[in-house]
Image (cartoon, helix red, strand yellow):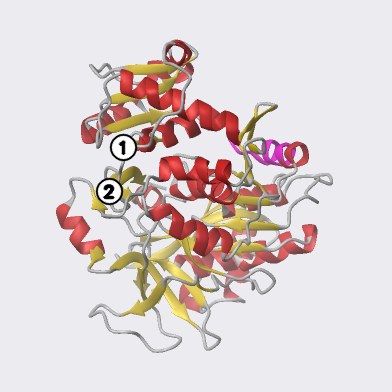
Amino acid sequence: MERFNIGAELIERNLREGRGRSPAIWAAGKTLTYGELSALVDRVGAAFLKAGVKPEQRVLMVMPDSPELAACYLAAMKIGAVAVPCNPLLRTADYAYFLEESRAALVVTAAALREKLPRHDKPMLVTGVDFEKALAEVPEQKLEAAPTSKDEAAFWLWTSGSTGKPKAAVHAHQDWPHCCELYGQGILNLQPKDRCYSASKLFHAYGLGNALAFPFWVGASTILSPDRPTPDVVYKAIADGRPTIFFGVPTLYAAMLQAKGDPEVESLRVCVSAGEPLPGDLFSRWKSRFGTEILDGIGSTEVLHIYVSPRMGAAKPGSTGLPVDGYQVRIVDELGNDVREGETGDLVVRGASTALFYWNRKDQSRQKMRGEWFFSGDKFRQTEDGEFHYVGRSDDMFKTAGEWISPADVESALISHGAVLECAVVAKKSEDGLLRPRAHVVLVQGKQGSPELAEELKQHVRGKCAGYMVPRDIVFATELPKTATGKIQRFLLRDADV
């Protein structure tokens, strides 16, 4: 049995290569070197062991992005336990569910979040209260990594899903190296001199790769911030921290393009987007303004990170690019047969970073993880140049006038209008009982919704899409419901009584 421990390897590979004094984390105006991070991980791991955590038990983490969260994630895996990071912006009821589902042996949280957690009988460490004391009570010495196997469970990631309670995708120790080498190095060409900054946070697969696994694998550094990534916050972080790679989501890129002034982004050599399809107009406007490509990739919590992506220097508006080397991707019909070029079907992917299963979800594991293939739930089509184009989520698409409508196509047309900041298109029953497209639109600052503008937007879509795709109604909104990772929750809009 091959021994491998990712909690240890992400740090120790840098110590072996002489990068102990190189910066690993930039946070709150301070720098943590790889040597200092290694010592912190070992102290945290020793504190976890002293608290009674045993191999294979879960450590639940409800913390903002910080060096402490990074150390807790690595330390839990290093001692052979299972790291379970959680979104720190949820409700008490959500954490009650996470506690029950994970049967955590230990909870680690921040003082500012302590009151959000439900009452429980689990041991708990609170940063700013007793966490530092627990570290001071353990000896400062090298902690030996648990002799875990590469296929052993190392961490859970909660899937947001469109409805219902989150599922935990169980990932093994061997999963991150595939993503780091195939995407982090193969696509982004990450080097030790790079500095990463991710708007997506560490509790999410996208952010965890961007801001921890990828930079640590090659000896680069990461900028961590607990703040909500508003355009002002992000631009300041880029100006102050000088990252070379920025990871965002489409709604954030749209908001950043509306910012006035002349932001400092000269340090960026490439930008990445995921979570939602990036409209081609946003790609073109960003590149025109800042001269930097946005690589719009598709990934999933279950496969851990991005598996279809454009290549640097060859990204095109509206295209998700080509499969990342090392992953096999197909577009299939409802019988599992490959569709013809240009036809829409379900995207399935095969790759070594796919989760082992969903915790306590045997039926859903079987439905989504069929042998070596993971059924993503995304609709795609492939053009004659071999590139993949996102069509929509399987549960977001709907028929009207006997024709399938992809919300992504209508949204892309809408967002190309200068008055539209972001939008979401859903199916809504009309008076005749038939489904018709309805668009929920957030306007750019300074624009006001009106019947005249609604009609103008309809005509704008008509000029770019087939007539049956033109929204029957335009609803002007101040904001759209989103998950913590920036995905628009269309199911809430479908259910909205407006």
Is disc 2 surrounded by few (<14), some (14 to 19) or many (20+) residues within 10 Å?
some
What's the magenta region? Answer: 224-237
Q: Position of residue 461 (x, y in %)?
A: 58, 70
Compared to residue 431, the image places residue 43 above or below, namely above
Instruction: Please tell me in which quadrant of the rendered image residue 285 appears.
Output: bottom right
Q: Which mark is residue 230?
A: none
Q: Which residue is mark 2?
A: 152
Q: Is residue 227 magenta?
A: yes
Is disc 1 surrounded by few (<14), some (14 to 19) or many (20+) residues within 10 Å?
many
Picture residue at 48% right of the left edge, 31% below the top: 71
Nearer-the-camera pick, 476 or 420: 420
Nearer-the-camera pick, 113 or 141: 141
In the image, 325: left or right of 191?
A: left
Q: Position of residue 309 (x, y in %)?
A: 54, 68
Q: Is residue 412 magenta?
A: no
Picture residue at 45% right of the left edge, 10% below the top: 133
Q: Which mark is residue 80?
A: 1
